[in-house]
Amino acid sequence: MGDLFYSRDTGLQGRGGVGGISRSAGINDEYAALVGAMFLEEKVAPFNLVYFFKGDSIAHHKGLDAQREYVATLDAYVAGMFEAAGGEEKLLEEYAVIALADHGHTPLLTNKRRYIHLGRILGEGTSVGARAGFGPGVEVVAVPNGRSALLYLPEGAPDEDREALVEKVLSRRGIDVAAWSDGEWAVARRAGKELWFRPDEGGDAPRDAAGRRWEISGDPTALEIEVLEGEILYGEYPDALERLWGCVRSERCGDVVLSASPGYTFGEVSGKFHVESDHGSLHASDSNVFVIAAGLPEGMEVPRRITDVAPALLEHFEGGPPTLSGVAERRVS
Ligand SMILES: [Zn+2]
């Protein structure tokens, strides 16, 4: 993070700081590493979070090979932090370390087809961009977000309008999955196949790897799901049910959520799009992330999903998991 705090002069921010005043006001990996090292050296907190952002931007603009090279720089930053804590052994005596990516990246096609221009596909009556919204003549609001996109219909629009919209977009190259909420169910459609699903609390429906049971109806191959002896096995769409359920049931989700095929992107709200690689889809190519852990206390499992990290930490620090879905209601004091 560029500037975690300004309450103390670390000697690292400001005009004379790392990268000068302009760099210190933004996101800056070197600054993050130096502040992280300072925290460890001074043992200021039982928990430290250091976020390196630049690998993402390098991948977007220069591609995955350039990002891999940058990992060597990050490695040196982490080494500096370990050193500040008194060396690897000492650090692992006092802290557990979890290193993980917050998302993956998938390379984009090298030609201009990589960009799925929703405004053009949906045509007249579509509002898209930073100032998108409903007004006279607007039938759909489209919000691109990298390799996913949200489509909004006017309040109270009939189901037929959503169906027409889904049919229209799924016929276009590069648009892989469409999903939406229907009554008590979530629905996903891909390659002409449709799957209906919802959590089965306390029932005996098939179970995913995280232990959650799902009532499913329709064609599981719509999401490359296989059900084997009561277990849900995922193919190219990891943890698809949990992720789609969380998305389509959240209050601010669009009436339809879209996921792009590998190689394609919906671009940004600004109207621009990344050229080398992008992320945000349901597909494994940008969903899978690495996680490395060392020094975990006995009984603590390595988090297997990004969403498992916060509950694992809260449990470790005895705060318990947040009670409000999506928003932390209580905080660890
Ligand atoms: Zn990114």
Image: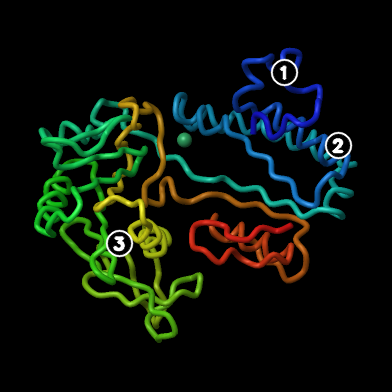
Q: How many marks?
A: 3
Question: Relative to 235, is 46 on the left or the right?
Answer: right
Q: Could you tell me if the residues under marks 3 and 1 are in contact, i.e. CB atoms within 8 Å?
A: no
* Residue 308 in which image quadrant: bottom right
On screen, residue 27 versus residue 179, left or right, reads: right
Reading the chain from its start, which is encountered first: label 3 or label 1? 1
Query: Quick one: SS at disc 1?
Result: loop
Q: Earlier in the sequence, mark 3 or mark 2?
A: 2
Residue 12 position, x and y percent, is: 77, 23
Report the residue at 16% width, 45% height from top. Answer: 169
Q: What residue sits right under mark 3 in the picture?
A: 223
Q: Nearer the viewer's eye, disc 3 or disc 2?
A: 2
Q: Position of residue 49 (x, y in %)?
A: 69, 44
> Crowdedness of circle 1 by 10 Å Cα count: few (<14), some, many (20+)?
some
Circle 2: residue type: Ala
Mark 1 = which residue? 14
The picture quadrant where one finds residue 190 is bottom left
Q: Nearer the viewer, residue 290 or 252?
A: 252
**Residue 256, x across and y down, in percent:** 25, 52
Above or below, 103 relative to 53: below
- Discs 3/1, front: 1
Q: Amino acid at mark 1?
A: Gly
What amino acid is at disc 3? Leu
Give the percent coordinates (x, y) of residue 69: 59, 29
Task: Say which element carries label 2.
Answer: helix
Q: Residue furthest front?
A: 136
Q: What residue is rendered at 16% in x and 51% in y?
A: 166
Residue tagged by mark 2?
A: 84
**Helix, strand or loop under label 3:** helix
